Image (cartoon, coloured by chain):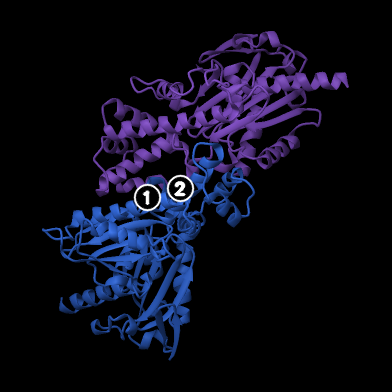
Chain colours: A blue, B purple
Amino acid sequence: MTTSSNGDQEITTKRSAGGGGGGVILGLDGGTTSTVCVCVSASLLSSSSLCHRQIPILSRAIAGCTNHNSVGETAARETLEKVMAEALSKADSNRSDVQAVCLSVSGINHPSDQQRVLEWLRDLFPSHVKLFVENDSVAALASGTMGKLHGCVLIAGTGSIAYGFAEDGREARAAGAGPVLGDWGSGYGIGAQALTAVMRAHDGRGPQTALTNSILNMLGLSSPDELIGWTYADPSWARIAALVPIVVSCAEDGDELASKILRDAVQELADSVKAVVQRLGLCGEDGQALFPLVMVGGVLKANKSWDIGKEVVDCISKVYSGVHPIHPEVEPAVGAAMVAWTRYVKASQCDDGS
Amino acid sequence: MTTSSNGDQEITTKRSAGGGGGGVILGLDGGTTSTVCVCVSASLLSSSSLCHRQIPILSRAIAGCTNHNSVGETAARETLEKVMAEALSKADSNRSDVQAVCLSVSGINHPSDQQRVLEWLRDLFPSHVKLFVENDSVAALASGTMGKLHGCVLIAGTGSIAYGFAEDGREARAAGAGPVLGDWGSGYGIGAQALTAVMRAHDGRGPQTALTNSILNMLGLSSPDELIGWTYADPSWARIAALVPIVVSCAEDGDELASKILRDAVQELADSVKAVVQRLGLCGEDGQALFPLVMVGGVLKANKSWDIGKEVVDCISKVYSGVHPIHPEVEPAVGAAMVAWTRYVKASQCDDGS
């Protein structure tokens, strides 16, 4: 057995085939930029081990985007297959060892999306394997609550979404509809607003901003006119979202337009969470009940002085004082594995009992 | 010779090869949705004939989008070649009859764009043919000023742009940077805002709106969740812009959100024109000089009671009372032909004089 470190999280790599004989579980987190797959030992997981330091992670693999809305169905499917094969190979396992898979991926917005992706997985695994397909926010929530689906998660990376579960299993979401449909709190939304501010300053519709020089320098362009060609040369949302650190940096240096873009994003993100909390009644009858808010994604990470995540929590707590922010110590793919394991155990118990 | 009618405009179809022996001129207007090519007789055009009813149009052909930012370079080039071949064939002409071509197409935002598209054309025609490549707003302006490049044009179709020329030849533009870079006054912008309003009403972030039922009915969808799949199934900007009539209709029926979306679009469009007028000094030193504002595109066409074009002019005239709106009687492709002809004659005179 070897132990390696992956950021905050320890990966315990077991070199026994098939996860110690009891099979393995795959947890996948497919965001708008990349897809992570972890392989955990099914036999070594137990409810008492759901503390993040004891999760028996055998391996981890990473690949590109698997949101079919963003990269198309063929590419999404190929990437998915590849990342699972790599994770299994690194764990000295193969498909026949797999007991359950939870794929939590962005772009799952409707039962028909879920059904289609389930069929992709069904083609790859024998019929006894338990398969679960969810929106990527489910894994993110579970990563902060150690597998329990209760509370709200706010993801703000390239895309943004708020997703929640009530104790009785009801679900609600807000935003998460991608850039065309107004996810202005996302990294993409912040980047696109920054580019727009540069264009407006350039053609005289808007005030001058430090964003102009900062963005042109970063992209190696000499004039805002060239931004048009740059923007449409590649439809990937992630490269627009990659401008967020520049916007934060300009805001920290006092640029008024950059600050306004971030304040607007904070408002959008807080509105998404408030809509979910309201619909599910997570705040209780008096509006003051405690509820977990799992915070995930690069946009919510703390910066030098402009901390978007902190501002979002402050904004929510003015209305719902019981908000309890959680910054997960494991990554969403591990959350997906915990969801798969919980449901697998439950389904096995049902099978045994019937 | 036969005469047929095309909307407001008469097309005089001459069946003599090569436009009466003096060759032909091609004018092309490439918008974000379609491309129109007209073939006019070079010998029958004269400065005295620049009244729209006497323009010797031999033929007209129409094809898909030729904006390389929207459909990619290969598709744009193929469509361009096809639409010119069709116009020439309909005029009983061929490439060897062509004296000059003006291609005025959206997506030309930088000298490097212009150079690339010029090279496509250069591959198709002998070296003596005069070739001109411009942003699509140049043809639109010329269609309202009978070929004279002075004043401002506002285009609001699928995309939007304000473009102007001063008497001394200086040019300026505002907006026209596509949907990612904040063209919120465009048909695409209006459509995307309407879709966003539906999503916000659905997930509890925003108020209810009549847009929800109207849009779902038009698209044959049963729930706003299905809008996400619909939106990203096809990256074409035109299908989002096709929602504009629904937004206008809801606004006319009193829906507050639809009205707000249109009011915001009016402000965006007026701001674009004002920026161009200001930079070029089209309003004169006292700010009250007369200047033409050519208005082109489906968004600016009059509706039952909510007239976006009229509202834009009202908004501009509060600042620049000399604004003189022109709704062209010929289409932009004819404007492109007039630009090609004017420059061709000028170049020929220079050649003769040297």
**Residue nearest the viewer, comparing A58 with A217:** A217
**Residue nearest the viewer, comparing B202 with A125:** B202
Residue underneath mark 1: A264
Which secondary structure, mark 2? helix
Point out the tag, 1 or 2, that comes first from the N-terminus: 2
Q: Chain of mark 1?
A: A
Q: Is residue B28 above or below residue B212?
A: above
**Residue nearest the viewer, comparing A347 with A38:** A38
Q: Amino acid at mark 1?
A: Asp
Image point (59%, 52%), residue name: A216
Q: Amino acid at mark 2?
A: Gln
Quarter occupied by residue B117 = top right
Which secondary structure, mark 1? helix
Q: Chain of mark 2?
A: A
Residue underneath mark 2: A193
Say if mark 1 contacts mark 2, CB within 8 Å: yes
Few, some or many residues within 10 Å of mark 2 (<14, 14–19, 20+)? many
> Do we see residue B223 in this rendering?
no
Name the quarter where the N terminus of chain A is drawn: bottom left
In percent of width and height, residue B204 lies at 24, 48
